[in-house]
Image: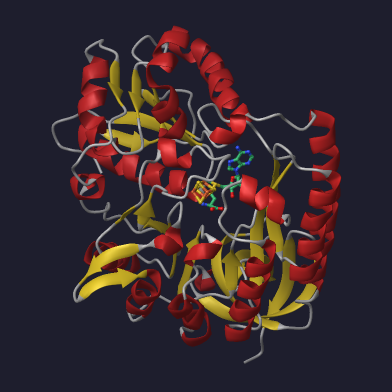
Amino acid sequence: MTSSTSPTRKLFIKTYGCQMNVYDSERMAEALAPSGYEIADSAEGADLILLNTCHIREKAAEKVYSELGRLKALKAENPDLKIGVAGCVAQAEGDEILRRQPLVDLVVGPQSYHRLPELEARARQGAKALDTDFPEEDKFDRLGGRARARRGPTAFLTVQEGCDKFCAFCVVPYTRGAEVSRPAEKVLAEARDLVERGVREITLLGQNVNAYHGAGTDGDWGLARLIRELAAIDGLDRLRYTTSHPNDMEDDLIAAHGEVPELMPYLHLPVQSGSDRVLKAMNRKHTAESYLRLIDRIRAARPDILMSGDFIVGFPGETEADFEDTLALVREVGYGQCYSFKYSPRPGTPAAERAHVAEEVKAERLARLQALLAEQQEDAQQAMVGKSVGVLFEKAGRMPGQLVGKSDHLQAVHVEAPETLLGRIARVDITAAAPNSLAGRLSAK
Ligand code: SAM
Ligand code: SF4
């Protein structure tokens, strides 16, 4: 969408990190559309390049600085090119980025995206523009409605931001601020709008999405109530949510997994460690045992649910025995797909000040954990062979006549199918499994 007064300019956004950044990038593009910006597929030839950054681990921030280094050549070719840094690195390092990388014109934190048009205009006039405030106003209100264009069948929708948990390793409470939930009516309106534009599946996002408590039509709504209301929207067939904290898995949310057919049987529920000693040092406020019993209750409500999680190895003070407790927990749960990381000290977080586990020990533990998780993932994939699953087709596959979609359990599925099924859900009989994808054929009926 281009305003009649501005010439068309090209905007390239490179997104790092989590799904919330993917959502934010879409919203930034929409905020800049009235200034004449259209999305471009590559940095070459762009008039504005935004790096939407992630600060969760050290390497992520370093990647941003090396990417900025690479952009130097483009700026030399086109002196009118403006370069901006958004996201959590922008929030955490603000001025430092402008000092360290003179080619950056604009720095904007995650709570200030509605101010992008103004910041871009300042940058165009040759000023360095910086906004890393946590403003009082609701950025979602100021960002306004979503663009009207038709879009693919899946979408992210941020319902909650920030975190009050303060895990000892994590920068999120500092970069994204305190927990804030969007009013339920705003979420429902955005969801209806997405459905009108062809969306069939929505993933609700939040740093702590199951801590959602938004104003509803009859008082405060938790995530379970929000999910039930969203599920009633005609044409919205699938709902997911991520990421959750074990302590916020309330009874009504667990019950929703058994009662709301639109809520898909996949849950990302990070535990981080299987050692109570480490969990305490991480300030997680749950134990390995309480996590395991929670999973029992979730599986009682939805027996076929596929569990996912996050793990950190080599947290300060983690011993070999602690790490073995993590392996034991993984064996007991049996995950479908997980993310695992070496502990990375983040400046300003309590754990960064503690004595660190040696790098080679972290690497060796991560390799062992990942080998076990890969085995479990393969088992979960193999277990799908012979089953009939619902698949939402999202795009053409690499082979002619093939479409790719996602199963109810969020596994990629390749199927020979007509293009008319794009954006629709069909039953598929799974015939083969690879570690990261499934293959199948359309069910006869
Ligand atoms: N809110 C979610 C939760 O409570 O688990 C996770 C949010 S965080 C963006 C995603 C994951 O990054 C975490 O679950 C954790 O495993 C990992 N992570 C966060 N800080 C980290 C650090 N300092 N070093 C390594 N991994 C980290
Ligand atoms: Fe970070 Fe998640 Fe802990 Fe919040 S709950 S501090 S986002 S790991």
Quarter containing the N terminus? top left
Q: Position of residue 12 (x, y in %)?
A: 42, 32
Above or below — where is 200 with respect to 53?
A: below
Left or right relative to 120: residue 47:
right
In depth, the one of 106 and 243 nearer the eye is 243
Give the color scheme: rainbow, by chain, secondary structure or one colour: secondary structure
Q: Is residue 25 left or right of residue 422?
A: left
Q: Is residue 190 left or right of residue 338?
A: left
Camera-side residue of 62 and 38: 62
- Closer to us: 248 or 157: 248
Instruction: Determine the image quadrant of residue 185.
Output: bottom left
* Depicted 132 relative to depicted 137: above or below: above
* 1 relative to 355 in the view: left or right: left
> Residue 86's x, y, as percent?
40, 31
- Residue drawn at (26%, 70%), measured in percent from left and top? 220
Quarter of image, res 264: bottom right
Q: Is residue 334 above or below residue 167?
A: below
Q: What residue sits 80% from the left and 29% below the top? A: 358
In the rendered image, is residue 249 in sight? yes
Query: What residue is rendered at 84% in x and 61% in y?
Result: 375
**Res 399 visible:** no
- Compared to 44, does 428 lie above or below? below
Question: Most extreme residue toward the left, as rendered?
Answer: 5
Q: Quadrant of the C terminus?
A: bottom right
Rendering quarter of residue 386: bottom right
Question: In the image, residue 184 lies at what x, y percent?
Answer: 26, 66
Which residue shows up at 65% across the image and 33% down it?
344
